[in-house]
Image (tube, rainbow, N blue to C red):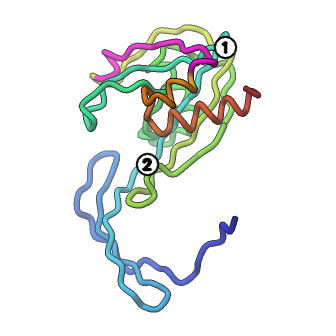
Amino acid sequence: MNLEYREGFKKVSEKLIHNEDWFSFVSAEFEGPQGEIIDRYIFHHPGAVAVVPIEDRNIVLVRQFRPALEMEMLEIPAGKLDVEGEEPEAAARRELIEEAGLDAERLEELCSFHNSAGFSDEKTVIYLATEMKKVEKIAASIEEQYMTTEKVPLENVHELITSGRITDAKTIIGIYSALQRIGE
């Protein structure tokens, strides 16, 4: 597989369309290798973290309402890197506490990926959490106040994905990366 960067593309300009406290939306112009002009909209995102918590041969998942889809989703705990200066591992620990009420003695980076490279620079780092203890859940948003947790046996997660009951990309990537890491 060739992963080399193809030289010749360069950003010419970027114009801010909208800015919020944690993201921005811009219009950008690029020049191709032979001078072609490429106009694109880009969603700048601070990045995110996600955690695959495994205890007693179960994965702890959260069920939460997702406004963009107007439905509840079954996912691994996750969140934005929206606390200035916070390292990804610390953010992963914070999100695990906020969403699942668990604190991990051990966090191990599994992988990272770009969520939607066609229009966003968002990158998510996924961690495996083990050796956990229950702590007070600290909901940071309205959705988190209504979030529930579910323990799913390792042997059942593949069926949840193939049946379409889990469709969230970070959850699928995280689960399969964790299963590979632990040898399942």
**Vertical placement of residue 7 versus 35, above or below:** above
The quarter of the image holding the N terminus is bottom right
Closest to the observer, 26 or 157: 157
Q: Residue at x 67, y 19 (%)?
A: 130
Residue extending farthest to the bottom is 34
Q: Position of residue 153 (x, y in %)?
A: 60, 14
Describe residue 154's horizontal placement relative to residue 14 as left or right: right
Report which residue position mark 1 lands on: 57
Q: Earlier in the sequence, mark 1 or mark 2?
A: 2
Secondary structure found at label 1:
loop
Q: Position of residue 147 (x, y in %)?
A: 36, 17
Q: Position of residue 95 (x, y in %)?
A: 48, 26
Disc 1 residue type (three-letter): Arg
Q: Is residue 176 magenta?
A: no
The quarter of the image holding the C terminus is top right
Q: Residue at x 56, y 38 (%)?
A: 173
Q: Which mark is residue 47?
A: none
Q: Position of residue 150 (x, y in %)?
A: 47, 13
Q: Which mark is residue 46?
A: 2
Quadrant of res 108: top right
**Vertical placement of residue 35 versus 113, above or below:** below
Describe residue 157's horizontal placement relative to residue 38 as left or right: right
Secondary structure found at label 2:
loop
Determine crowd level at label 2: few under 14, some 14-19, many 20+ residues with C-alpha closer than 10 A: some
Q: Which residues are magenta?
A: 143-156
- Of the residues tagged 1 and 2, which is closer to the observer? 1
Closest to the observer, 139 or 71: 71
